[in-house]
Image (tube, grey):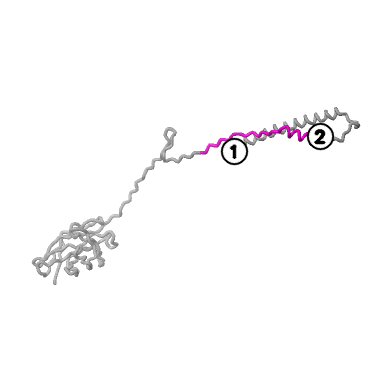
Amino acid sequence: MAASISLSDPSSDILSEVNQEFEITVNLSINAADGTKYYLRSVFFKSGTNKYCGYTWSGQNWYNGPFSSNDGWKNLPSIIISSDSAQTRVKSKLDPLDNDCNSSGEYFFKVERYTQGGSGSFDDQNEQKIIVDIKAPTITVKPTLIKTPTATSGFKSKSDPIIVAPSITVSPTLAVIVINSSSISSILSSEFAISDSITASADVDLSTVAGLAGRRIGNLTYLTLIIGISLIFAAAFWSFKKINNFRN
């Protein structure tokens, strides 16, 4: 059946945003019985291509396919023929997810007609030229200030880590050497015992022997005292160095 479409009264000939809506009046002239229903699909395309894209407003939602299967054409706006003609206003927009429909440039617009059985065709019509001028989005970086917690009145904030150094207390230990009388007696018995072999007939002055033994005992006692005092000072010096090492 011979059919033609006339497009008129476009809402704009420039689209500056990818989601900007475009409206136009569609006049369909066709030799068809009254009450015949058709469905209209809005399409955008670039000159010299047949890569159609865009959404069509059905009256309830935006739809962009599929159209020829699963009764997809019934999601498009419909018109009813009366006296071989019908008129309606369709609304459409670009598809930002379609690479053929989301860049700036010169586009054309036209309408595809679907029958009730899902057969689609492009009737003769006056295609509309549309300029798409989509500006690249401007990214603005807003600096975020991070407040650094400071100590107040000598107390740290909860966010600051608290490091507690272990406290080490070292008490000096003095070495005490105890020499009991039995040890001294043993030393004296082994070192300065008078041999039983000395007889009274020997020409020995007993008082001299006794004096010599007494001096040796005195010297040993003095030597023991010196050794003890030296050990005490050595132990104190060792403890002092250990305390300094712990403090450092």
Spot occupied by residue 170 in the image (x, y as percentages of width and height): 58, 35
Residue found at the far left of this picture = 83
Disc number at residue 245? 1
Spot occupied by residue 161 in the image (x, y as percentages of width and height): 45, 41
Residue 181 lies in the magenta-colored region:
yes
Q: Which residue is drawn at 19% across and 63% down?
A: 76
Along the polypeptide, which appears first: circle 2 or circle 1?
2
Q: Is residue 144 visible?
A: yes
Spot occupied by residue 58 in the image (x, y as percentages of width and height): 19, 60
Answer with the quarter of the image where residue 200 lies. top right
Residue 88 lies in the magenta-colored region:
no
**Mark 2, other Cα within 10 Å: few <14 / some 14–19 / many ≥20:** few
The answer to which of 194 and 32 lies nearer the viewer is 194
Disc number at residue 193? 2
Residue found at the far bottom of this picture = 1
The answer to which of 124 and 91 lies nearer the viewer is 91
Give, as a three-letter code, the residue at label 1: Asn
Give, as a three-letter code, the residue at label 2: Ala
- Disc 2 to disc 1, C-alpha distance: 49 Å
User: Which of the two marks, 2 or 1, is nearer to us in this view?
Assistant: 2
Stretch of the chain drawn in magenta: 165-193
Residue 66 is left or right of residue 198, and the answer is left
